[in-house]
Image (cartoon, helix red, strand yellow):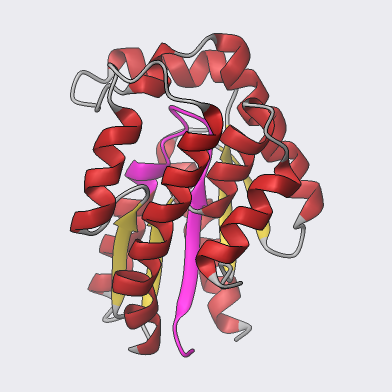
């Protein structure tokens, strides 16, 4: 397609959004065409779906409903924003993508990784990231970071138990073994500059091998 599709994943409080913005700034300053976006969201329709999914009042939402809403938002985001950018030859940095659904809904919610993967393969028409950076952190540490971050969006996932967040991390670990050629693990408990430097080096190495 011409561009490079990079997704950024991790448990709550891993710092992925901050690192992604640093990466976007770096590549833009280097003259590399880059697009930064997020899931669920990124475009108007998907942002509206995001509001429904993450509304703290929607505690009765069924796990399959949640998974299907994520997949629907992902499809629209992909066709309207990500694919056009890749066709223009840009680097696309996306805060969360299919692996979030596999870890959160597939594993932590107990819907089944394979089942959620099948739904999402239909949604993305088999378009997978070229590279995924997984920022790993102990859930206890990540949630403490969030508690200190007054400006962070508070959503329905913040109401989940620590056991749920531990399952999310366990789910990501399973994905690391399942997609070793695509997903690269980064220790997100390090100082932010170290995490950013590691992420930047991984991407540059990937670019040099293209």
Could you tell me residue 174's position as x and y percent? 77, 40
Q: Is residue 176 magenta?
A: no
Q: Is 195 on the left-hand or right-hand side of 166?
A: left
- Could you tell me which residue is drawn at 36 percent across and 71 percent down? 82
Which residue does the image show at 28% across and 34% down from the upper left?
A: 52
Image-based side of 174 in relation to 103, left or right: right
Magenta stretch containing residue 4, yes or no? yes
Residue stretch in magenta = 1-19
Q: Where the C terminus falls, by quadrant?
A: bottom right
Q: Position of residue 171 (x, y in %)?
A: 69, 34
Q: Is residue 161 left or right of residue 118?
A: left
Q: Position of residue 25 (x, y in %)?
A: 26, 62
Residue in view at x 43 percent, y 24 percent: 61
Percent coordinates x, y for residue 183 in the rendering: 66, 56
Q: Is residue 151 visible?
A: yes
Residue 59 vertical position relative to residue 34 in the rendered view, above or below: above
Q: Is residue 29 above or below residue 142?
A: below
């Amino acid at each position: 397609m011409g561009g490079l599709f990079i997704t950024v994943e991790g448990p709550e409080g891993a710092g992925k959004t901050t690192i992604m913005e640093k990466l976007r700034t770096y590549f833009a300053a280097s003259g590399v065409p880059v697009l930064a976006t997020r899931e669920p969201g990124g475009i108007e329709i998907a942002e509206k779906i995001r509001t429904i999914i993450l509304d703290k009042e929607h505690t009765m939402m069924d796990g399959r409903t949640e998974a299907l809403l994520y997949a629907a938002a992902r499809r629209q985001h992909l066709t309207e924003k990500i694919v056009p950018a890749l066709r223009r030859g840009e680097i696309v940095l996306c805060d969360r993508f299919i692996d979030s659904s596999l870890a959160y809904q597939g594993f932590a919610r107990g819907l089944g990784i394979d089942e959620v993967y099948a739904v999402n393969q239909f949604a993305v028409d088999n378009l997978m990231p070229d590279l995924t950076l997984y920022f790993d952190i102990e859930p206890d540490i990540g949630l403490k970071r969030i508690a200190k971050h007054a400006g962070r969006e508070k959503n329905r996932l913040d109401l989940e138990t620590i056991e749920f967040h531990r399952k999310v991390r366990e789910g990501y670990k399973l994905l690391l073994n399942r997609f070793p050629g695509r997903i690269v693990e980064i220790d997100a408990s390090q100082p932010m500059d170290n995490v950013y430097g590691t992420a930047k080096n991984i991407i540059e190495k990937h670019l040099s091998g293209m």
